[in-house]
Image: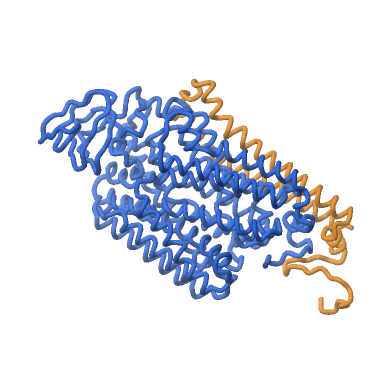
Amino acid sequence: MSQGYGIAAISIVVALTAIIGAFGLRISRTTSDFYVASRTVSPLWNASAIGGEYLSAASFLGVAGLILAYGADLLWLPVGFTGGYLIMLVLVAAPLRRSGAYTLPDFTELRLNSTRLRALASVLVVGICWLYLMPQFQGAGLTLRTVTGAPLWAGELIVAIVVVTTVAAGGMRSITFVQAFQYWLKVTAILLPAAFLFLSWHADDSPSLTRDSLPRFAVATTVTAPEDLQIRVTQPVVPRVTGVVDGLRYVGGVAPLAPGPHTVAEGTRLDFPAGAPVPVEENLPAATDEAWAQPLSGGREHSLYTTYSLIIATMLGTMGLPHILVRFYTNPDGGAARRTTLAVLALLGVFYLGPTLFGALGRIYAPDLLLTGRVDSVVLELPSRMVGGTGGDLLSALVTAGAFAAFLSTAAGLTMSAAAVLSQDVFRSRDVRTFQLAAVPATLIPFLFALIAGGIAVGDAVSLAFAVAASTFCPLLVLGVWWRRLSTVGAAAGMVVGGASAGAAVLATIIGGPYQGWTGALLAQPAAITVPAAFLVMIGVSLLTPRHVPSNIHRIMVRLHVPEGLGQEAGDFSR
Amino acid sequence: MNEVDRSKRVVVTSPRARATGAAQRGVLDLDEQTTVGEVYLRSLMRTQLGLALTVCLTALILVAGLPLMFDLWPAAGRARVFGLGLPWLVLGVLAYPALVIGGWAYVRAAERNERRFAALVERR
């Protein structure tokens, strides 16, 4: 890809974000404006903003990359990301809005009358935000590296600075405008190139995606190892090599690679002839295209369990993401909250058609990413490879802009939530100035994490955030909204058990993994165990401690469930 | 509301509330935890929860039933419709409109439940 276009695209997105943010600054004045945009945002704007906030690095880059590597099994990932909003719509959307709370800790305190429980919720919110922010920074670093060859920290730094500035300058009002703009940018940036790629594939006589063979290089391809690689060869292949393979130095000579593991040193050039089978990075499955296109046919170990766990984590984790929930408070009433959520379902469904197509076509046109292991960059690489010339450059610039919009908007939303909790619960102030200052630690700490933990895959950190959210806030919200006998002790026990088990499992995977067999499957996808465990503990302990049920439970249930306009006090919840 | 006798308790309403005197009585029932208010609230919650669980169950059968179907009956995973593999057509394309339709049906039903509830409260 031409560097100039990519840099221009990133600059334009950053500049537009800053300008729209500054525009919001002139409107937002009071504390209430900063937190919830005065609840005057219409459902479509709100839904666009939620979509903009939700479609993160994981959706924009990660989904296509995972589909390229793992195939049909991962089709459930975007379905789960979208389906999470259906679950949220039917179980919690309207009651949450009617609660009148600003943040998840607010809701926790309102529902259970406990400041200690509020503190626990605050810790979890900040933890989930930081976990989720880290991969956004990493994604930004990765994108800037793909486009310009800049070091990873450069992209991370740019996103961190823009986010702190926008959040501190405009609060949520400006963020709502910024996010809505980001959604439409992202949809255009994924669907327009996807349409061109589809036409290009069609013009290429629609090569089959389901051949009974390993992925093959469609044309003669040169791959330069970006770092030291461990690869696995399934069918013998004879590339020309300049560099070091298996400890032997070659200068343009042929290196016959027999089936089995091989090492390729950083900077080594491998020239593959057209039609050669693609060696695969050792952590990715080496499946034939036919097996890849079929669900549950051996891409991963214990794929049925893993698929179910993925469905549970994504569908139930969505409602527990702090930066999404805060958006419900910008609806004027519970009915609007429902219509907003419905619009989000439609907007997300439209978007996710794109990454799926990118992932599938990547299998034909960018199989070398399986060799380098950099499947996350398939969305960035594909347009310039399939559409040549200036058109390809422009489409590349567009997806780059969309990717940057993804990091900026999600990071801004997460920073907002973390800053709101930090300013209220740590610095104990509702002052606008405190909120602005709190945006700095809210961004700085995950930025440092991203710098230190450079090796953690984007998808791993995101799935950790979803699993933790599904194991803590999902039971709290669902039982809190529908079950009168939920007690403070029960809620605390469930959240601690769910959060600790899910957190421990995926931390173990990130630090020591990937593990093999059942251990690996359970630790990489803990939700199928930890979510039911959290629910059971919360219910069981609540039944054992009936004296710790809030005494004003009737009044709380009236507020959560009775529609506005029926005269009950629907004012703001304040401490 | 300025004319209200200050010695009596009044319901503090939101600006959007258009509650009439009759409606306020119903609402007082709701807030004050009288038997009638309790019955109203429980019936509303039961209706809405039943609706929510119906939608969740349908989604569960569709989304969670598919992995099981593909696992037990691999031929379904190889089937092709309109030149596309069945799993790709169902999960990559059709799942999204299905989710939207489910959500739309839910919103309609939930709002109808709330209108009925409002009519019940205000009739008293």
| Foreground residue among A128 and A67 | A128
Q: Is residue B92 visible?
A: no
Image quadrant of residue B27? bottom right
| Foreground residue among A291 and A317 | A317
Q: Which chain is orange?
A: B
- Look at 38% across and 65% down and name the residue there: A161
Q: How many numbered circles does the render carry?
A: 0
Q: Is residue A356 above or below residue B31?
A: above
Question: Where residue B11 sits: x, y (%)?
Answer: 82, 68
| Foreground residue among A493 and A175 | A493
Question: Where residue A407 sits: x, y (%)?
Answer: 41, 55
**Left or right: residue A489 compared with residue A137:** right
- Look at 77% across and 68% down and name the residue there: B13
Q: Is residue B18 above or below residue A556?
A: below
Rendering colour mode: by chain
- Look at 66% across and 42% down and name the residue there: A537
- Look at 47% across and 66% down and name the residue there: A439
Q: Which chain is blue?
A: A
Looking at the rendered image, the quarter that the N terminus of chain B falls into is: bottom right
Q: Is residue A442 above or below residue A502?
A: below
Q: Is residue A30 visible?
A: yes
**Left or right: residue A7 compared with residue B114:** left
**Left or right: residue A384 compared with residue B25:** left
Question: Where residue A430 sits: x, y (%)?
Answer: 58, 71
Question: Where residue B94 sits: x, y (%)?
Answer: 53, 37
Looking at the rendered image, the quarter that the C terminus of chain B falls into is: bottom right
